[in-house]
Amino acid sequence: MMAAATVLLIDDDDRVRDVIKIHIVRGGYVVREARDGASGLAALEAQTVDAVLCDIRMRGMTGVDVLEKARGLHPTVPIIMLTGFVEAEQAAEVMKLGAFDYLTKPVQRKDLLGSIAKAVEWRRLVVANARLEAESRERQRDLERRVEERARDALLAALRNALEAMPEDGRLTVRLRRAASGQGVAIEVEGDGGGISPEAVSRILEPFGAIAPPSGAEPGADSRPGRTTFEIALPAPEAGGPAGHAHPKPATNCCAS
């Protein structure tokens, strides 16, 4: 069974507040009370409610003040404004500020409960929609992570195949790390002897993304002879991925560290 919705009632007139509270409780709602605007905001901060009923004309902090602050802090909580004066200009003002509804006192029980029911249902739909959107974003992120993982696997498989096809009279050390930009994978290639060359690796990796030496350097411009670093425009791996880990030894004629 769904729990009863909670309504926060803010009014500085004890007698009026008592009467309205009776109507709300008989309508099946839980009521929390506040006798002025400041205590009403404090109550709203202490516990989220499903709807707020707030008198406009109160001593100290007015209902308009409460409306503006509450909407800024809790935009998904509907606020119904109450007043004993029928003023079209004032009604237009509070609706423009984001009030859910505007009722005049003495409010009819039917009108009161009807407005509360609509407000509670509106909040329920807003919260449910936000939950669905969050779940959809998480599913999208999960799908993107899987695609990224497959792309990295394809990249590593292509590199392994390239190493296996190279001449046996040389060695090639390959290291993987996170790209300096944080947006891709950096592959550091160091060749030693034989027909192994970073250029050959570059040709193999090129279909998987733009290859750019870090800091504007040209391939092969590393200070250590025979070492070249390539940055592949693939999403950076998650924690535990290949960044910072050595590539496994792909063949007996190559080594990786």
Image (tube, rainbow, N blue to C red):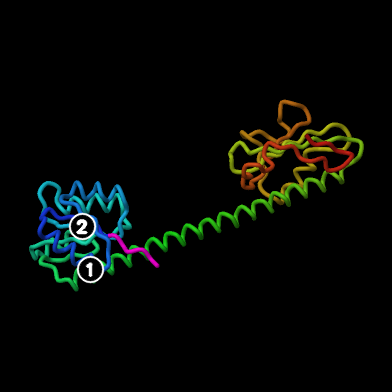
Pick the residue in front: 145 or 161.
145
- Residue under label 2: 9
Q: Position of residue 236 (x, y in %)?
A: 62, 44
Q: Which of the two discs, 1 and 2, sits closer to the camera?
A: 1
Distance of label 1 from label 2 (alpha carbons): 15 Å
Q: Quadrant of residue 173?
A: top right
Residue 222 on the magenta span = no
* Residues at marks 1 and 2 touching, judged by CB atoms closer than 8 Å: no
- Label 1 Cα crowd, 10 Å radius (few <14 / some 14-19 / many 20+): few
Q: Position of residue 9 (x, y in %)?
A: 20, 57
- Residue under label 1: 26
Tag 1: amino acid? Arg
Q: Is 28 rendered above or below residue 45?
A: below
Nearest to N terminus: mark 1 or mark 2: 2
Q: Position of residue 206 (x, y in %)?
A: 72, 48
Tell me the residue at 44%/59% (across/down). Answer: 131
Pick the residue in front: 233 or 24.
24
In the image, farthest residue toward the left: 85
Tell me the residue at 71%/29% (across/down). Answer: 222
- Label 2 Cα crowd, 10 Å radius (few <14 / some 14-19 / many 20+): many
Quadrant including the N terminus: bottom left
Main SS, magenta residues: loop
Residue 2 on the magenta span = yes
In this picture, residue 167 sits left or right of residue 98: right
Q: Is 198 rendered above or below residue 133?
A: above
Tell me the residue at 10%/59% (across/down). Answer: 15
Tag 2: amino acid? Leu
Q: Is 159 rendered above or below residue 27?
A: above
**What span is in magenta?**
1-6
In the image, farthest residue toward the right: 169
Q: Which element type, helix, strand or loop, lies under badge 1?
A: helix
In this picture, residue 45 sits left or right of residue 36: right
